Structures are given as structure tokens and as C-alpha cells.
Image (cartoon, helix red, strand yellow):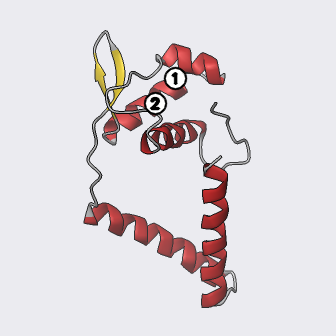
């Protein structure tokens, strides 16, 4: 079950979005599966319903879900695409993090090693 990470720099709604996307990517939630209502989910994870509503709206904006009025929110069918614009945006963000490490005094190899270790730790954490 979902647990908030109070140490995370991500907001609560961002953590909810990431959690739901992870469930979709891992096929725990499949296309056309109904998500819990905002009220049910907010009660289950003990957060404000407005936070869950904001997360659901963001998931829909990103194309991960769709809403049928009066019926609820459902997982969208998604083709795994490799949008070059999205890839470029992500690479730019990664590069910004890399530059920050360099500004902190780490050499190129050290910065890349730190980033690689971080990704491996996160992958191990997310697979649980």
C-alpha cells in the first residue's frame, strides 16, 4: 500500500501521481481498470481529498487516466512512445542535476558515479 515519504522533496500530490504511474507501468493497474474514488483513496492514505483530486487531474492531463462523468476515473490505454521532445526535456533536467554536482566540486567521473549509484538505489527501493 502507498505510504507518504515525509523526507521526500516531492509534494504529497506528486508522490500520489508517481505511485499511481508506477502501478500502471508495472501493470498492477491495467488499461480500463477503475481507480478508487477520490474519497476512498484519500481516506485509505489519510490525505486531503483535494490532494488526491489534484493528483487524479494531473494523471489525466498526462494521459495516464480518463474520467467518465458519474462513473469514475479509469486507467487509459497507453502506447509506449518515445517522444523525442519529452526525452530532451528529461535529459535537460538530468544535465542540470549533473551540473549542480560539478558546481559542488565533484569531478566528472565522481558526478556520474553519484548519479549512477543514486539511480541504482532508487531502482532497488522502487522494486519493493
- Please, is residue 29 above or below residue 87 in the view? above
Identify residue for label 1. 50
Residue 105, image x, y percentages: 70, 86
Residue drawn at (65%, 46%) of the image = 128
Can you name the residue that lies furthest to the top here?
70
Residue 41, image x, y percentages: 55, 20
> Badges 2 and 1: C-beta atoms under 8 Å apart?
yes
- Please, is residue 49 above or below residue 51 in the view? above
Label 1 packing within 10 angstroms: few (<14), some (14-19), many (20+): few
Residue drawn at (32%, 12%) of the image = 71
Please identify the quarter of the rendering in which residue 116 is found.
Answer: bottom right
Identify residue for label 2. 54
Please identify the quarter of the rendering in which residue 73 is found.
Answer: top left
Residue 30, image x, y percentages: 38, 33
Dot 2: element: helix
The residues tagged by marks 2 and 1 sit, at their Cα atoms, a distance apart of 6 Å
Amino acid at each position: 500500500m502507498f505510504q507518504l515519504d515525509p523526507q521526500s522533496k516531492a509534494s504529497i500530490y506528486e508522490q500520489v501521481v508517481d505511485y499511481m504511474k508506477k502501478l500502471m507501468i508495472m501493470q498492477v493497474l491495467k488499461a480500463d481498470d477503475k481507480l478508487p474514488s477520490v474519497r476512498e483513496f484519500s481516506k485509505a492514505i489519510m490525505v486531503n481529498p483535494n490532494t488526491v483530486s489534484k493528483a487524479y487531474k494531473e494523471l489525466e492531463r498526462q494521459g495516464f487516466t480518463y474520467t467518465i462523468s458519474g462513473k469514475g476515473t479509469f486507467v487509459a490505454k497507453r502506447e509506449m512512445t518515445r517522444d523525442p521532445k519529452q526525452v530532451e526535456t528529461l535529459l535537460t533536467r538530468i544535465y542540470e542535476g549533473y551540473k549542480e554536482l560539478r558546481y559542488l566540486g565533484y569531478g566528472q567521473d565522481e558526478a556520474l558515479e553519484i548519479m549512477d549509484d543514486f539511480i541504482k538505489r532508487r531502482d532497488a527501493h522502487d522494486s519493493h
